[in-house]
Image (cartoon, rainbow, N blue to C red):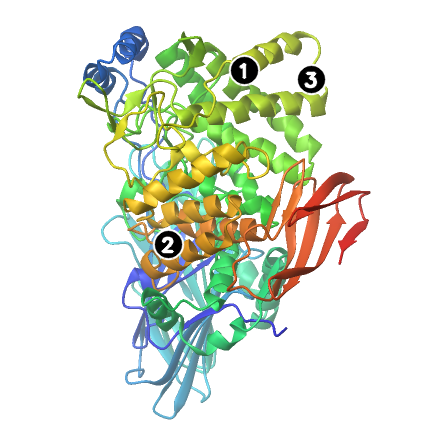
Amino acid sequence: MNEGKSRLWYRNPAKKWEEALPLGNGRLGAMIFGGIGRERIQVNEETMWYGGKQDRRNPDAFRNLEEVRRCIFDGQIEKAQRLLNLAFSGCPDSMHPYQTLGDIQLELEGQGAEDSYERSLDLETAVCSVRYRCGNVSFLREAFISHPEDCLVMKLSADCPGQISFTARLERGRFFDGVGKLGDNGICLYGNLGKDGVEFVSGLRAAATGGNVQVLGQTLCVSNADEVILYFSADTTGHGYREELESKTAEEQREVLIKHLSAILDSAAGYSYETLLQRHCEDYRALYKRVDFQLEGCDTYDAVPTDERLQAAAEGKADIGMSKLLFDYGRYLLISCSRPGGMPANLQGIWNQDFQPPWESKYTININAEMNYWLAENCNLSECHLPLFTLLEKMQESGREMAKEMYGCRGFMAHHNTDIHGDCAPQDTWFSSTYWVMGAAWLCTHIWNHYEYTQDRAFLEHFYPILCDAALFFLDYLVEKDGYLVTCPSSSPENSYRHPSGETGAVTYGATMDNQILRDLFGQCLLAAEVLGENTGENKAFLEEIRNASERLIPNRIGSRGTIMEWVEEYEECEPGHRHISHLYGLHPSGQITMDGTPELAEAARKTLEGRLSCGGGHTGWSRAWIINHYAKLWDGEEAYHNLEQLLAISTYPNLFDRHPPFQIDGNFGATAAIAEMLVQSSSERIVLLPALPKAWKTGSICGLRIRGNAEIDIHWEENELTECVIRAKSDIRNKVLYKGKYWEFAIAAGEEFTIR
C-alpha cells in the first residue's frame, strides 16, 4: 500500500484567519497567512491571560443552599433559579480572557504579481511553506516553531541573489506599553496585561546572507539579501518559576524577560538553519511518528488543494483521504499546543487572534476541555496529557475554597469553567450551565484514564489524593431523595426542560450525567486504592463510604420513548436537537454502556442519538465529533463515517479548524479520538478490533495506537476484513481480543508480542 501524504495545501494566500495555517511548540503559537507583498503572522503565547488571580466567591451561597434545594424538590424551579442567580453567581460573574500576543507584519518589497503559488503545511515535519514566482524570480518561505530552541524560525530565500528586501514590525493594536531595539538586528514589543496581570515581551531578530540589516525606529529593515533567517520568541512573567523575577518591579521584571528572550534568540542563531530544522523535526517526529494511519488509495487525493476537497465534501463527495488528514491533523495540533511543563489546550488550543475571544477562550470543563484530551492516550501522546493534570493541581486550592464557602463541604469542586489560575467559581449567569458542580469530578476521571494506558504507578500515587479530594466533596454534597443519593442543585449541561408545573427549567436534582460521572469517580478511587495498597487503615472507612454512596446513585434508566433518560423525570425537552448529549456520557467517554455488556442500554443510547439528530443535533463541530465517538462505541461504522462526512461538510473551516462556529479546537481533537475508537477499543476486560470499520475504508492499517494496559497495537485489514493484529506490551498485560464474536486470550510480559493472523 502506498503511503498517503499528510499535508494541507492551497493555491492562494489566506484572506481570513480561519484560512491561515497553525504552527506551535506547546508554548508559542503562530498563524501563517502566506501573503505575497504583505505577510501577516499572528502569534500567541500560552500565558497571555488578561488580569490576575481573582477571588470571585459569592458570600451568600451557603446560607441559601437549603432554600434552593427545597425549591427544586418542591418543583418551584423558577424561584430556585432566581435565587441561584443572586446568591450563587460569581462576584464578578466572569473570568478574565486569554488574549492574542499580536502580529508580525512583513512588507515584502518587489513582490507583487505572482505565478505558481503554493501554500502548505506538512504534518510529517510541522513546517509551513510558501512558494511562488514573481517575474523571473522564485521565492520560498519556510517556517516552523522549534520546541528545542523555543522560538519561531522563518527562512526567506530566492533562486536569484539579492532579491530579499522587506521591513518587519511587531504590532498589538494599542494594547502594549512600548517598543525597542533588541541589539543591532532585532526589535521587541513589551507591555502588561492589566491590574495584577503579567508582564510580557516579544522579540524578532534577523540574520542575513548578503545585503544589509538595520533597525530604524521600531522597524526591522532588510535590503538586498540573498537569504534571511528570522527568529521570533516571547516570554511573560506568567511562568513564575524563575527566581530572578521575585521582589522586582514591573520594569525590572521586563528587563529580566528581555535578557531571557535575547538568550533564546542568540542560542537559536548559533545553529545553522539546517541544524535548526533537523533538531525541530527530530523532536516533533518522536511524538508524531508513533502512530501511522493508512488507507489504500487516499494518496491520490493529495493532488487536489485542501479547500477544494472540503468544497467537494460540502457537496456530498468527501474523499477517504480526508479521514486520514483529519486524524493526522488532530495529532499535529495536540503536539503543537500541549507539551509537558506548559499550559493545557484551551478552547482554541493556543491559537487566538482576539483580545476578547468567544467564551474568553477559557477552559470549558463541561465537555470541551475534556474532549481536547480524548485522543491523548489512545493516539499514543500521553506526555501531551500532562499539562491538564498540572492545571488540575492549580484548581485544587480554589476548588477547596468553593466547596467550603459555597456548599459547606469538604474536598474540592469546580463549576463549568476554569482559567490559567485554576479559578473554580461559577462562570456567567446561565441557568443551564453556571451552577453545575461536576467540573473537577469529570477532569479527575482523566487521572485514572492516564494510569490505565500508561500503568505509571508513580503518577497515580501523586494524583491519588486529588482524586479522593474530588470524591470527598460529593460525600458531603449528595442528599437523600426518594431512597437515592442525588446531586442538588444539578443540571444537564447546557440543556433545559419543561416542568409538569409548566415552568421552564434547567436546574434540577440527580441529572443522569452527574450520576454517570460519579460512578466513574467513585469507582476509580476504589480501583486506585487497590493498586496503591491504600485500602487499609484510616482510608478503609473513607473507601467504604464511597462504595456505599456509589451504590445509592440513580441508575441509568430507559424512558417511555426507549431513550436514555436525561433527567430524574421524563421532562419535555425545550430543544430536542440540543448540541450537548450529556446523558450519553456513560456511552462515551465512559464505558458504562457497551454493546456487549449492556445491550439494552446501548440500544436506548442509539435511539437517543437518532432522536437528537432527527431534530437538528450535531449542528456544532464538537457536538458532531462527540456523535462520531458515540456511534463508534455502538460499533456502527456506517453512521460513524456518515457523521465524519458531515463534520467535514458542515463544521470545518478551510484550514481544517473545527467550526463551532466560531472556531473551537475540541472538534478537531474529538474527531481524531473518534477515528481511533472506530478502529480499536480497549478496556481492562477486552480489546475490540475494527468495531466500527466503515465500508469506505476498504483496505488499510493503523499502527502504534495505545491500548489500556500499556501496550501498542498494529492492525491491518483488506476488503474490510482483519488480516493481522500485533500487540506489543510495554508492561505485563493479560486480556482478551474480540473480533466479530471471536475471542483470543493472551498474557504477555513487557517487551513481548502477541499476534493474530
Q: Which residue is labeled 3 in the image?
A: 534
Of mark 1 and mark 3, the one earlier in the sequence is: 3
User: In this picture, is 322 found above or below 36?
Assistant: above
Q: What element carries label 3?
A: loop
Residue 451 in view in this figure: yes
**Residue type of the residue flagged with mark 3:** Glu
Q: In the figure, is residue 491 to the left or right of 465? A: left
Tell me how far mark 1 sits from mark 3, CA to CA.
21 Å
Q: In the figure, is residue 568 to the left or right of 683? A: left
Residue drawn at 40 percent across, 89 percent down:
137
Res. 658 mark:
2
> Image quadrant for the N terminus?
bottom right
Image quarter for residue 9?
bottom left
Residue drawn at 61 percent across, 13 percent down:
543
Q: In the figure, is residue 410 to the left or right of 622? A: right
Tell me how far mark 1 sits from mark 2, CA to CA.
39 Å
Residue drawn at 35 percent across, 24 percent down:
567
Q: Which residue is labeled 1 in the image?
A: 551
Q: Where is residue 682 in the image (x, y as percent from the top left)?
A: 63, 42
Residue 98 in view in this figure: no
Report the front residue among 186 and 578.
578
Q: Is mark 2 on a helix, strand or loop?
A: loop
Of mark 2 and mark 3, the one earlier in the sequence is: 3
